[in-house]
Image (tube, rainbow, N blue to C red):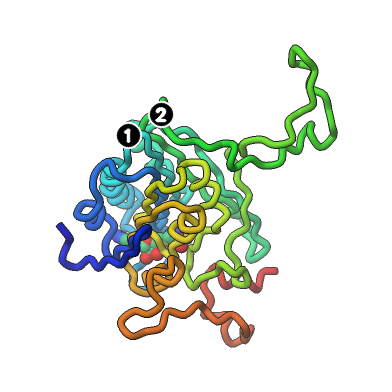
Amino acid sequence: MQATHVRVFKNDTHRIYHGEALEVLNSEIPDGSVDLIFADPPYNIGKRFVDFEDKWPSDAEYAKWCEKWLNACISKLKANGSLYIMTSTQCMPYLDIYLRDRLSILARIVWHYDSSGVQAKKKFGSMYEPILFCVKDEGNYTFNGADIKVEARTGATRKLIDYRKPQPTQYNTTKIPGNVWPFPRVRYRMPEYEEHPSQKPEALLERIIKVSSNPGDVILDPFSGTFTTGAVAKRLGRQSIGIERELQYIKIGLRRLGICSELDGELLKALDKSYVRRNSLSSRFTDNQQSLFEE
Ligand SMILES: C[S@@+](CC[C@H](N)C(=O)[O-])C[C@H]1O[C@@H](n2cnc3c(N)ncnc32)[C@H](O)[C@@H]1O
């Protein structure tokens, strides 16, 4: 049964829910129906998402909030499904401890990026965000390693021979990536940039979706933001379900997923990035936009 204040937009392969993640998960998504979940919730670090300030009274209360929607997510996953979750470095330990009793955590991934902007003066600056890769059944899950191979630099580029094998052979030139993933953050001038304070790069989602789902699979993102997950799922021939509480971001999703070009009489247009007045605008810029001035 549809909750009263949830609005749904859809076409044949993609669905967008405007509402609260937990409520939509409980009322709209059948149990055991999803192949892959990518969850990128607020990080409890005080960012502002339109009307919502991402700050809980304590890390423990934030963790309690996460546990509720994580339980719902686990129920929605198929028996061979996978869950990727991101949060802040300081809050991830709570979620790691909670999830290791409920799912198998197969990898603790570090999304590493460089920052040439404001540098920390009295501590080590933050240059990564953690990602957990979990599955319901470690004996049965999708892992298309061949689809995400990267260049194997050591050995292969120097044309070294591996003499440890029974038959000496050259090192492989490609490999499945390790658990440190270097992807640049989304910058203002990049075509994929949308107006949002914590948009994730398409390249990051592309790796996750390619390796942990197959064409036609259903991918769920309960905190969709700019709908990066849906946009990449669409490009890769997967189905998507996205949930987001802020109407401003729903409009981005509707446009990115091609569900409609107009909402309530408003034309859904991409951001015009043709001209930026550096000085007068810089004070209003979000973190992502601010990076324009860092380079
Ligand atoms: C970290 S951002 C997600 C960014 C997204 N991965 C992207 O690439 O754009 C978290 C999003 O969750 C939304 N949000 C916060 N609380 C929510 C809730 N209870 N239900 C649904 N969405 C929520 C925020 O508005 C924000 O857009």
Evaluate if marks 1 and 2 touch, with contact meaning CB atoms under 8 Å apart. Answer: yes
The amino acid type, in three-letter code, at marker 2 is Asn
Which residue is labeled 2 in the image?
Answer: 140
Nearer the observer, 246 or 251:
251
Which residue is labeled 1 in the image?
Answer: 79
Height in image: 90 above or below 279? above
Q: Earlier in the sequence, mark 1 or mark 2?
A: 1
Residue 251 placement (x, y as % from top left): 39, 73
Q: Which residue lies furthest to the front in this view?
A: 12
Nearer the observer, 61 or 216:
216
Nearer the observer, 74 or 66:
74
Tag 2 secondary structure:
loop
Q: In the image, 124: left or right of 86?
A: right
The amino acid type, in three-letter code, at marker 1 is Ala
Q: In the image, 155: left or right of 290?
A: right
Quarter holding the N terminus is bottom left
Could you tell me which residue is drawn at 42 percent across and 49 percent down? 38
Using the numbered discs, state the Cα–Cα distance from disc 1 to disc 2 in whole angstroms: 8 Å
